[in-house]
Image: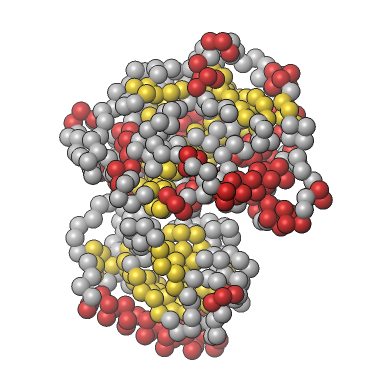
Amino acid sequence: GVLRPAGMGRASSTWHSGALRGDRIAWLTPELCRERSLQNLQALVRQMMATARAISREAECPFELNGGMSVQLSEYPGDGEGYIRHRDAHTPQAGDKAARVLTLVMYLTHSWDAQRGGGELRIYHDAGGHADLVPIHNRLVAFRGDVVEHEVLPVHTKRMAVTLWASGTMKAPSATLAPADSPAPAPPAETPQRAEGVTPLPVPSTVPPLRLSPSADDGGLIFVSIVSYRDSECPHTLRNLFLNARRPGRVRVGVVHQLRPGEDDHCAAMLAPAAFRAQIRELRLHCDEARGPCWARHLAQALWQGEDFWLQIDSHMRFRPMWDSFLVQQQLHAEGQAPHGKAVLTAYPSDYRLPNKDSGERRPAVIVPERFGEDGMLRQKGRLLACLPERPVPTLMWAAGFSFTRGEAVLEVPYDRFHLDLFFGEEAAMAARFFTHGYDFFSPAEMVVYHLWTRDHRPSRASAPDPQRAARAARARRRVELLLGATEAEGLRREDCEDAGVHLEAHGLGACRTLAEWCARTGVDPVERRVDPAAVARSLEGVSLLPTTGDVLSRLVPRS
């Protein structure tokens, strides 16, 4: 009776997701260990603590164990859940005296069946690859959980373990987070430094800073979610977003790098200003392990630690000055217009060209559905407004490459980890889920970011045929069809139902509004695979758009 579902995050921002972490836990405090049912664990806990001290003392570790220890009893019920790839240490906060620097795990389940039970501890190597450790009885594993990424693979039989985290301080000085209200460093005063052969770009802009309301609130931490596939522009994107923020100290970044070791080191070079590098949380995967943008964004969401706002962008973007305060103010405006008080700012950005020249376009764009492709997935496009509006403008669809909303949306509308290798279909599925959970979409009153629409500078996973990838994508498209009601479950083969529909309820529609209401507003008919232009026009009545013949944006956005 002492076990409770495990959470993620820290302190008051703890949150729960069985899809990301499926164990139940109890913290083994001295008081709890004195209870009759747990007394036999006291000796084990003492032995694990002594082992941690011995490792610190005798293994020439770069840390000192001077911050105490915490011990946890965990049980995986055996229903196929695990624990997503992660590190054990939280990003340091102001006032932290010590952080987790050593992790010990002791496995308790007798007669573990490695073939049927699963649940291996996967340890990822910096140079690529991994090692899987079977959780056999009385096996003790010790590692630097703060720097070594690890994962618990799906567990199919009930499994118990005791985990100890020893806290300490590094013997060498380490970076700390900048105060949340610290101003941006002046770009001219910073001396550009080479990082792994990459030279930081200057921060020019052909447009003025974004317009702010002097009296409006713009407080709160912002979590920026980025996924990068072998993208040499990612380091410049990170640098640009910090240097153009009004208050960069309140920005936290979670980036998922998908790299080929030895070839792509420059794609993860650290070019962000030194004062803010501790605010970047990273996962690094071998590019051969990549499973598409939805899967990677699902991993990036796991790096959220309860920040007030969530911004999702692509890894090749440029920001206008004051973007952080502008988006917070625009979010508050949009929530005031939204029927349910819940809003998402989203748009297809205008372009920039390498190395660092933005288009200069200030007018925002709305997103509209266009047509269904041969794969059965909806295509959409951006349409520029004819002039700058005074407030956020309602838009019909959602863009994965630029989305800003409240942080709790990470919990309410989490990315579907089963959308493996899905590209087209991602945005329609997320749009329907956001809408039925009560969110309305708005375009900010000005263009906030610029996007590199050409892909010539980076490798593509789609460059070589891969039957397994194609099969995963086909299953993901079937899953989108199930979500949008385009395919009735009784019309599927049994294996399709078991595969495409697994855990769909955890990544399904909300109860605030219906799918039929979403279809009526957007003019999208998933069953007949058609878009009603008249319905689109009615929903955007009063919004003045550029004619399509003069709309550069609608020609830039790929819609194949």
Position of residue 93 measured from the top left corner of the image (x, y, whole percent): 34, 54
Q: Is residue 536 above or below residue 184?
A: above
- Residue ID at (63%, 33%): 440
Residue 137 or residue 541, whichever sits in front: 137
The residue at the far right in this view is: 490
Q: Does residue 416 appear to the left or right of 270 in the view shown?
A: right
Q: Which quadrant of the view contains residue 118?
A: bottom right
Q: Does residue 191 appear to the left or right of 424 in the view shown?
A: left
Residue 521 or residue 428, whichever sits in front: 428
What colour-coding does the image apply?
A: secondary structure
Residue 414 or residue 245, whichever sits in front: 414
- Residue ID at (77%, 53%): 493
Q: Which quadrant of the view contains residue 149?
A: bottom left
How many numbered marks, from 0 up? 0
Position of residue 140 measured from the top left corner of the image (x, y, whole percent): 40, 80
Position of residue 530 measured from the top left corner of the image (x, y, whole percent): 73, 28
Q: Does residue 362 appear to the left or right of 356 in the view shown?
A: right
Q: Does residue 372 appear to the left or right of 319 in the view shown?
A: right
Q: Is residue 38 above or below residue 521?
A: below
Position of residue 224 measured from the top left corner of the image (x, y, whole percent): 43, 41
The N terminus: image quadrant: bottom right
The C terminus: image quadrant: top right
- Residue ID at (74%, 31%): 529
- Residue ID at (68%, 47%): 479
Q: Is residue 389 above or below residue 510?
A: above
Q: Is residue 303 visible?
A: no
Q: Is residue 172 visible?
A: yes
